[in-house]
Amino acid sequence: MSSPLETISKDATIQEAATAMREKGITALVVPSNPPSIVTSTDLLDAAADGRDPTDVRVADVMTESVETVPPDLYLEEVAAMMTSLGIGHLPVVEKDDYVGMVSSTDVTAELS
C-alpha cells in the first residue's frame, strides 16, 4: 500500500486534484467524508472528456462515494479478488476508523509478479 494516505477536500477543484496526483505520482486521492469517498484520475479524465472546466468543477462533482475499504492485515489475494469482483483499481486502507494508506491495482500487480 501507499502510505501516508493522500487526501483532498471535496471543495477543491479537479484541477487541484490533478495537480496533486501528478506531483505525488499517484492516481487516486481519498476525500475525507462519511461515507468514505475517492477521486481517481479516471474521474478527472471523464470530466475533461465531457468538456468541463477543470477550474470550475469541484471534486465533490466527480468523486465516487461510499467506496469499499480494507484493513491493513487483509491478504493480498483477497484484495486482488475484491478489486476484480468490484471492478475497481483502488482501496483505501483503514485501521480503527483511521485511514492509513491506499492499495492500488498497480501495488497488487507489483507484489504478485
Image: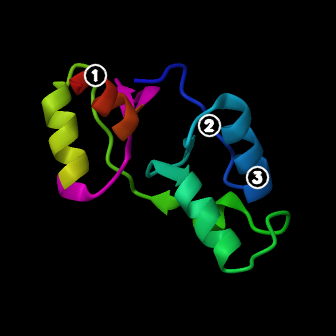
Give how far apart the Cα atoms at labels 2 and 3 are: 11 Å
Give how far apart the Cα atoms at labels 1 and 3 are: 33 Å
Q: Is residue 87 above or below residue 73?
A: below
Q: Secondary structure at mark 2?
A: loop
- Is the residue marked by circle 2 packed among few (<14), some (14-19), or many (20+) residues within 10 Å? some
Give the amino acid at mark 2.
Thr
Q: Quadrant of residue 107?
A: top left
Lower position in the chain sequence, tag 1 or tag 3: 3
Q: Which residue is mark 1?
A: 111
Image point (79%, 65%), residue name = 54
What's drawn in magenta, residue-wise?
A: 85-102
User: In the depicted view, which residue is nearer to us: 63 or 11?
Assistant: 63
* 37 relative to 79 in the view: left or right: right
Where residue 12 is drawn, which disc sits there?
3
Residue 30, given in percent of the width and then of the height, sits at 54, 42
Quarter of the picture containing the N terminus is: top left
Q: Quadrant of residue 24?
A: top right
* 44 relative to 23 in the view: left or right: left
Q: Can residue 8 be seen here?
A: yes
Quarter of the picture containing the C terminus is: top left
Q: Is residue 36 above or below residue 24?
A: below
Give the amino acid at mark 3.
Ala
